[in-house]
Image (tube, rainbow, N blue to C red):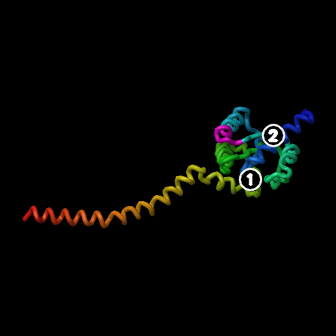
Amino acid sequence: MLTLDEKKAIVADVASQTAQAQSAIAAEYSGLSVAEMTSLRANARQAGIYLRVVKNTLARRALENTEFDCIRDSLEGPLILAFSGEDPAASARVMTDFAKQNDKLVIKVVALRGKLLTVADAERLAKMPTKDEAISMLMAVMKVPVEKLARILSEPANKLARTLAAVRDEKQAA
């Protein structure tokens, strides 16, 4: 049994994490072994995700008056909460990948920047590119017109050089 001070500390910890989070996922974990939970926690730690099992009453209290207040009413049963900080899709990636390998982990609630999404949206959220991937895709798209402009601007000089070379070759042949 938790003391009142321990409960307050848990609520404060979860509330501080939600203040920094961009997305949240709640998943039912009944039936997962200790080894599977340890593996999930390790995957979450590598991805920079805050993962915690919290009593629903404490979680509701922690989410009160936060951006993720929208998921409070959906918290039922034994749930594990995952909050993504910098990469909003990180928690969705880790949880959906783990759920594919372990059918005992069932995603119940998905929220992105304070908006409640459907469980099916977790898969779409997981497929979102990371910040670095998005930047590289943008740079690739921006690079094409610049390269084309460079080719167009250099073409008159190249054509002149080819013409002069052809004239030189013609005079040498004569």
Nearer to the camera, 135 or 167: 167
Secondary structure at numbered mark 2: helix
Report the quarter where the C terminus lies: bottom left
Residue 13: give its label: 2
**Residue at position x 70%, y 37% from top?**
41
Bounds of the magenta segment: 43-49
Q: Quadrant of the N terminus?
A: top right
- Quadrant location of residue 104? top right
Residue position marked by numbered label 1 in the rendering: 110
Give the camera-side residue of 154 and 117.
Answer: 154
Q: Please name the residue shown 77% across and 44% down the image.
A: 17
Q: Is residue 165 above or below residue 75?
A: below
SS for dot 1: strand
Of mark 1 and mark 2, the one earlier in the sequence is 2
Is 56 a magenta residue?
A: no
Asked if 80 appears above or below 135 in the picture, the reply is above
Give the side of residue 63 with respect to residue 155, left or right. Answer: right
What is the three-letter code of the residue carrying label 1?
Val
Query: What is the residue that sits farthest to the right in this orientation?
Result: 4
Residue at 92% of width from left, 33% of height from top?
A: 3
Crowding at dot 1, Cα within 10 Å, few <14 / some 14-19 / many 20+, comes out as many
Q: Amino acid at mark 2?
A: Asp
* Residues at marks 1 and 2, CA–CA distance in whole angstroms: 20 Å
Image coordinates for residue 107, horizontal then vertical, percent: 73, 49
Q: Give coordinates of residue 161: x percent, y percent.
A: 24, 63
Magenta segment main secondary structure: helix
Q: Where residue 83 sits: x, y (%)?
A: 73, 46
Mark closer to the observer (1, 2): 2
Q: Residue at x 88, y 34 (%)?
A: 6
